[in-house]
Amino acid sequence: MSKTPPKKLRSGWTTGACATAAARAAVRALLGGGSAERVTITLPRGETPSFEIAETASGPGWAEAAVVKDAGDDPDVTHLATIRSRVAQAPPGSGIRFHAGAGVGTVTKPGLPIPPGEPAINPVPRRMIAGVLTEAAAAHGVAADFDVTISVDNGEELARQTWNPRLGIVGGISILGTTGIVRPFSCSAWIASIHQGIDVARATGVAHVVGATGATSEATVRGLYDLPEVAYLDMGDFAGGLLKYLRRHPVARLTIAGGIGKLTKLAQGAMDLHSGRSQVDFARLGEMAARAGADARKVAAANTALEALQIAGPALAEAVAAEAAEVVADVLRGAPIAVEIIVIDRTGAIQARRGFAR
């Protein structure tokens, strides 16, 4: 019986690419080129996608266009969001100025690519938008003096599903993208958010950060420490993305917390803890159990790491925490970071704790 070939996942477009396409249509209308049904832009790596313009509007000295974001097959919270770019004539010599419209956030903390007080429109989207506006101005023989306001329908609500509140970006989502393309399930946006979280923590003087695999483990750590919101990095499955960035951008203290299954995989050297991308090696877990004085055979035959914990007890969790700490230290490669590992059960109860003062 032949297997059905796997479906090729479809790429999509970043919010920055959509805002750029909308800005191209808006400036065209502003400078007398009329409304466009589709526009083409050039992305940073040379691709030239075409975008459908969903809406246009204009008034004295301004024009606006909207693009509905298509994130392809990526589970992006901004998939199908409407991105609007309004381009208005600005006083001579103003240059191109960016503003946050409804649903686009404003930066309030240092450490991000954009300084506090500025709209959360990242550098590459700014360059892309400035490029299409400058090109249009040159074609019409006018100076590139424009006010650009980017807005996103329901952006403030969408932002609650992102890292923006923790990063001090208030009022909406960020306009992001370094290539203009969303690669399905590349996880690049999540890892980039982890990196931004570390940058903000360092810039605001936070010396202790937390990488938790999920909400339960994060809640457990919150009960142990009085840390600011920005200290909690939504590590999820991406231990490697967290640790490799901290190796180059260290903080004084790092707590990693998670359930026995995820942290067993970390202890066995996995850097991506997702169930589809790494698995517990139960034979190795049995060997760890034996060193902890437990029944290796029963542990090796367990169906899950949680079942193994129930068989072997807290001694197994202690062994997992110890080996996870060694793996983390190896990845950090001498970076000046004190590490704590916390293993929890499904209720959030601590089963093992390695590092820091007890």
Image (spheres, grey):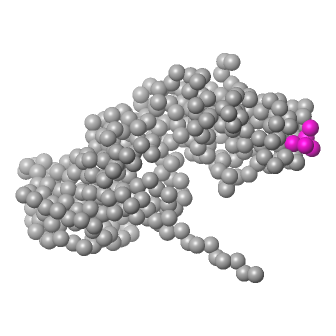
Left or right of residue 62: residue 284:
right
Residue 9 x, y percent position in the rendering: 54, 68
Residue located at (80% from left, 37% from top): 309
Examine the image and state in which quarter residue 345 appears: top right
Q: Is residue 298 magenta?
A: yes
Vertical comparison of 168 with 36: above or below: above
Position of residue 272 in the picture relative to residue 135 (left or right): right
Residue at 58% across / 43% down in the picture? 236
The quarter of the rendered structure image containing the C terminus is top right
Vertical placement of residue 168 versus 272, above or below: above
The residue range painted magenta reads 295-299
- Camera-nearest residue between 70 and 198: 70
Residue 231 position in % (x across, y down): 50, 30
Q: Residue at x 15, y 66 (%)?
A: 29
Query: Residue at the top extreme?
Result: 357
**Location of residue 346 in the rendering, given as x and y in whole percent from the top left corner:** 69, 37
Image vertical order of residue 24 relative to residue 284, above or below: below
- Membership of 189 in magenta stretch: no
Residue at the extreme bottom: 1
Query: Would residue 333 be found to the left or right of residue 58 on screen?
Result: right
Is residue 151 at least partly visible in the picture? yes
Kindly indicate the quadrant of the structure image that contains residue 108: top left
**Which quarter of the figure has residue 20?**
bottom left
* Magenta span dominant secondary structure: helix
Point 7% across, 58% down: residue: 60
Q: Quadrant of the N terminus?
A: bottom right
Q: Is residue 291 visible?
A: no
